[in-house]
Image (tube, helix red, strand yellow):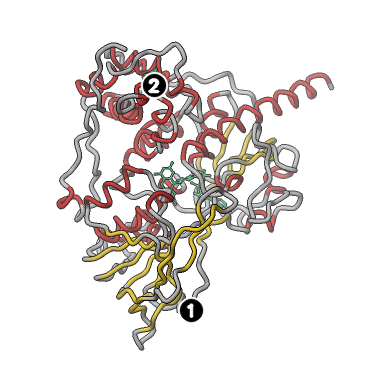
Amino acid sequence: MPVISPSKTPMPVADAKERAKTFREVNFGYDPRRAMQEADRCLRCQDPTCQTGCPVNVPIREVIHLTSQRRFDDALALIKRFNSLPGVCGRVCPQENQCEGRCHVGDRFGPVGIGYIERFLADWERLHGSQPVEKAEPKGQKVAIVGSGPSGLTAAGDLNHMGYDVTVFEALHDAGGVLRYGIPEFRLPKDVLDDEINALVRAGVDIQCNVVFGKTLTLDQLMDEMGYEAVFIGTGAGLPRFMNLPGENLNGIYSSNEFLTRINLMGAYRFPDYDTPVKSGRRVAVIGAGNTAMDAARCAMRAGSEEVTVVYRRSEAEMTARVEEYEHAIEEGVQFKWLNNPIEFIDDGNGWVSGMRCQRMELGEPDEDGRRRPVPVPDSEFVLDVNNVIVSIGTSPNPLLSRTTPGLDTTKWGGLVAEDDTGQTSREGVFAGGDIVTGSATVILAAGAGKRAASAIDTYLSQKRGEAAEA
Ligand code: FAD
Ligand code: SF4
């Protein structure tokens, strides 16, 4: 092994005390010197296992090599052949479980900072202007994409690139899905997201917001009356789950979706400049320990709460949040109560929550998914004083679409049944992918599903074109 620095080139970050009061981005990003220094840590392996860890199969070794040669435009152009959202993915992908988790340098040292390099390249393009995207000859066939999250945007970008006439229909007033309404500004600035969406629009993708599929428009209308020959459904899993505990309807208890949507989509952190307020009391409890819980806790700190505690029924080892978000949350002052489970919410006498009764837990035998099951410790109840609670224990798909669309097979938990390799659903010409098929997952897995479906849609529509030509 050549001599390489044992740890990643550090990412400059905002001071923890300062940043915990503002929504400005926490990570500042690499400059060219840092990006090239980090790229020099790559071994250019014969078997680049990093690439096999990437759900959209970016040729990471080649991207890093181009970066080390200061060929930033070429490096980004190469990424973009595989991923239309590099500025987003460079910021929010759980690289530790994907590309970086399989990097050979990581066998002995800190892995190559692939995510940091990807982010640098995307930001470089934003600063220095983008290269024009080549587009195939128009195919004369229309494809509809329902939902503008990473799965829908990726499918739209790929199909547009192949020459299809693509329209994205989005229920909310702005595009981006969870990237817009869930992930906060301090992790993913909205101008980064806007730039990546605008690049798709400039390339020819039409995005129509405020269209609630299943209500404003149906699948049959799209296909029978409006001339769309294929549809991709990427409507995500945005319906919050609750625990059904006594007192859960009290004022001051939010789902993380509502709390984050108020802040991120409706601009509540800029209230009264924006119309939507958000209440984040002096003491806040966030229930759950995934990315969503971490975002809610860090937003509550920034919205002025003095004490924010994440309460989780399992231990730190079972937490599903990205490591970087967890570390940043600790630095910003978020507290953690592992192995504690809420069992009741207490009324202050005026209909507002004032406390959360909890029970201590210990870990028992592994359950079906291999994680050790939390088991209550007898006589261990206590009350946590709180003014707000944010419930962040997961989400499921909104049933609107499947209820109003005949012929679509669904799972027990309300997701759509679709083939893994193609996204093909039980209806001809209808494909699906992302959280609506897998349940809550990650941005890049959703993007990967959008990519596979785009390729399958191309195959399907090519066959149709062939049949039409023969007839
Ligand atoms: P979504 O992003 O959910 O987008 C679906 C879109 O469809 C939405 O815009 C919705 O409004 C629209 N829609 C729904 N129903 C209809 C309808 N009937 N008609 C029209 N439009 C409709 N993943 C990571 O990799 N890293 C992270 O750091 C990370 N952090 C997260 C933080 C939060 C707060 C949350 C909630 C999730 C996070 N995730 C993260 C998970 C990731 O964001 C999702 O897995 C991903 O966004 C799923 O993409 P999608 O395209 O399937 O759906
Ligand atoms: Fe470079 Fe790591 Fe990929 Fe090897 S596995 S090519 S060292 S990034």
Check the image and report above or below for 392 versus 7. below
Count the labels in the image.
Answer: 2
Q: Secondary structure at mark 2?
A: helix
Quadrant that contains the C terminus: top right
- Residue 47 is situated, as x and y percent measured from the top left of the image, at 47, 15
Tell me the kind of residue under disc 2.
Answer: His
Query: What is the x, y in percent for residue 7?
Result: 25, 27
The answer to whether residue 10 is visible is yes
Looking at the image, which is closer to me, 209 or 67? 67
Q: Position of residue 21 (x, y in %)?
A: 19, 56
Mark toward the viewer: 2 or 1? 2
Residue designated by label 2: 104
First in sequence: mark 2 vs mark 1: 2
In the picture of the structure, the residue carrying the numbered disc 1 is 246
Residue found at x 44% / y 11%: 46
Q: Quadrant of residue 336?
A: bottom left
Amino acid type of the residue that numbered disc 1 sits on in the rendered structure:
Pro
Residue pictured at 57% horizontal, 49% vertical: 369
**The N terminus: image quadrant:** top left
